[in-house]
Image: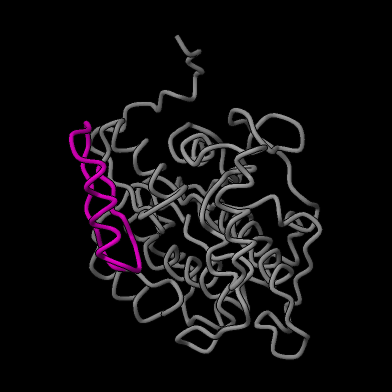
Amino acid sequence: MARVEPWQQVPRQDGRRFVVTGGARGLGLETARGLVTAGAHVVLAVRSVEAGEQAAATLTGLDGSAEVRRLDLADLSSVRAFAAAVGPVDVLVNNAGVLATPYRLSADGFELQLATNHLGHFALANLLLPTITDRVVVVGSASHRGARIDVDDLLWQRRPYRPYAAYAASKLANLLFLAELQRRLTAAGSTLRATGAHPGSTATDVTANTGSRLKTFVGRHGIRLVGMSPARGALSTLFAATMDVPGNTYVGPHRFREMNGWPTAVGRDRRALDPDLAKAVWSESERLTGVEFPEEAVSRR
């Protein structure tokens, strides 16, 4: 019989409602599966409702339930519409992302990786905070290490565009958002919290939008030689979403270079902990999205 590790069992989540962005496949779907198995109701927030319905069909027969709602993180009108209609939420899992895409603009005219990975999630979290009862989970990446972020040119309008550098910068923005969100929640006297996680080296189809068949193949298949399955990679997110850990906790695999293993609290690059940089990125994100931190709404909880 295979060895059962502690984090192959998610604590019961009966009666709790989660939103998982990018829940139609990969880490998002496996995160949803773990939550539904534990009795939760999960909203799969997805660009393609058809793909979401196919994913939800694989979650039937488990202890909890799932529903599908459309959300395009690269379109702020879609983010606002989703937030206005989704209803009360216990936990928001900001999971969806794109990696190393060719230079493209979002519906709002923003560089696509920053729009999808950071700005859309930034807006969604702040719009939902008045109805969230527990926490926001930010899914980061080890790629944030060594990343550089230019607050004066977040959208890569003046610099030569480099796909992987833009991806790494967007993931650094995720972790700066995590730290600044928790600082603001604490300052407001709120019991809500923000936690983060990264999946280590996990085989997913996140490379499908790079425009390179080779990179897509390596992302889907080659990494399986050294990486984890999406179900195993999702355990860090499940840990951050369900365990009673302090705000601003960042979770990742426990083994060498955090590439694989079981969930544990891990460190992050010093830039991700720079409070001045976090405040500057937050301010620019507010300006770009037109969405602000709902201090009054969270200070009462």
Q: Over which residues does the magenta segment extend?
A: 41-70
**Which quadrant is home to the N terminus?**
top left
- Image point 43% across, 51% down: which residue? 93
Quick check: 291 left or right of 255? left
Q: In x, y percent, where is residue 24?
A: 35, 55
Q: How many marks?
A: 0
Toward the viewer: 210 or 165?
A: 210
Does 247 appear in magenta? no
- Image point 52% across, 89% down: which residue? 109
Q: In x, y percent, where is residue 241?
A: 45, 40
Whether residue 39 is visible here, answered yes or no, is yes
- Image point 44% across, 66% down: which residue? 126
Quick check: 90 left or right of 208? left
Toward the viewer: 241 or 283?
A: 241
Toward the viewer: 50 or 141?
A: 50
Quick check: 278 left or right of 131? right
Whether residue 249 is visible here, answered yes or no, is no
Quadrant of residue 86 in the image? Answer: bottom left
**Given the current orientation, which residue lies at the most extreme left position?**
61
Quadrant of residue 157 in the image? Answer: bottom right
Does 66 appear in magenta? yes
Quick check: 13 left or right of 219? left
